[in-house]
Image: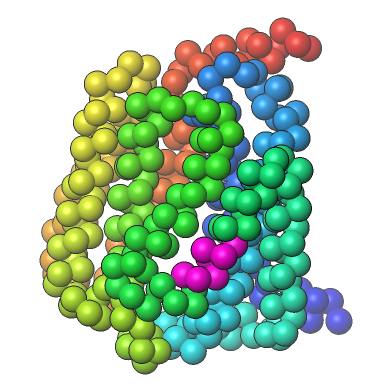
Amino acid sequence: MDKILAKKVFSLLSVIRGYNIAVLVVALYLSSLFVFSETQSIKEILFDYKLHCLVIATVCVIAGGYIINNFYDNKIDKINRPIKSYLDNYIRQETRLSIYFLLNFLGFVSGSLVSWRASLFFATYIFGIWFYSHKLKRYPILGLISVTTLTVLPFFVIFIYYKNFSTVILMYAFFVFFLIMARELVKDLENIKGAIAGNYDTFPVVYGEKTTKFLIVFLLFLALIPIYVLFTCSGFNFMKYYFYIFAITTVFVAFYLKKSITINHYLLVHNILKILLLIWVFCLIFINKSLIFDRIIKMLSYT
């Protein structure tokens, strides 16, 4: 009985991409603490119930999004990710859909506790994820733009909540947008067999692998433009070392992609970009060194 329960728990975590959800939670809180909020102390942020409601709503809606995406991609996942697909099937399709509706309901309610605007946003976000999974992902350019936008939107919610409209944040948004779009294209290359079998007109299927590789490299080099702008901003500190690594990695990926022809090659590039995004999340605390010390001092003063 315990083994069956454990399998179902792992199956659910696989369906909702538990790793991605965990990274998202960390990214949302770190961006709240060290990027979007410049005046509040750590204690004020951590005891802000509205922020927690926004994070809960975002997590619920995105976890639900993974479920509905899994529902529509069931056929191609058996080709692209046979092991994961096998693990996912420990939970019945009907149960997954029930969890999907429950998560969306919880997400909407959590957003409602913040404001009616937040509830409207999450209702629209839920529809957007469903519409992408059902229709938009079948179109190469619309699908690419929409999935990148849907991935970045959770940070947009926190950005609007704190009303911190600075050049630095805007440049970080552009950087992450280009990096995520490049990663999505690599995933499309990695999953090209399943896309063809499922009759999905993804970018590599329509425009070919060569054009897709060129666009990936172009997007990564395009991400260097906001980095250049960020280097001119004050308080940049230790984040510059991350961007040095990113620039070197971009050159490596450009040469490596040119000779890549197998799924394993694309999988390596995908993992490299995923690691870059993960490192970026934890580097958020280094955006403004003086801000970190100010937050710690304020927190200690309240104790």
Residue 280 at least partly seen: yes
Who's the residue at 53% across and 74% down the image? 69
Q: Residue at x 35, y 49 (%)?
A: 177
Q: Quadrant of residue 92?
A: bottom right
Left-right relation of 117 to 260? right
Comparing 102 with 82, the one in front is: 102
**Residue 131 lies in the magenta-colored region:** yes
Nearest the eye: 192 or 156: 156
Q: Residue at x 71, y 40 (%)?
A: 114
x and y percent of residue 94 in the render? 72, 84
Instruction: Name the spot of residue 260 as percent of width and height, x first.
Output: 19, 71
**Vertical comparison of 286 with 252: above or below:** above
- In this rendering, the answer to whether 227 lies above or below 105 is above
Coloring applied to the structure: rainbow
Residues drawn in magenta: 126-132
By secondary structure, the bulk of the magenta-drawn segment is best described as: helix
Q: On the picture, is 48 further left or further right than 244?
A: right
Q: How many marks?
A: 0
Residue 258 placement: quadrant: bottom left
Outermost residue, top direction? 301
Residue extending farthest bottom? 197
Q: Position of residue 152 (x, y in %)?
A: 45, 50
Q: Quadrant of residue 206?
A: bottom left
> Can I make out residue 83 in this image?
no
Task: Name the residue located 14 percent from the left edge and 72 percent from the top edge.
Answer: 210
Q: Position of residue 29 (x, y in %)?
A: 60, 37
- Is residue 102 magenta-colored? no
169 left or right of 82? left
Nearest the eye: 289 or 212:
212
Screen quadrant of the N terminus: bottom right
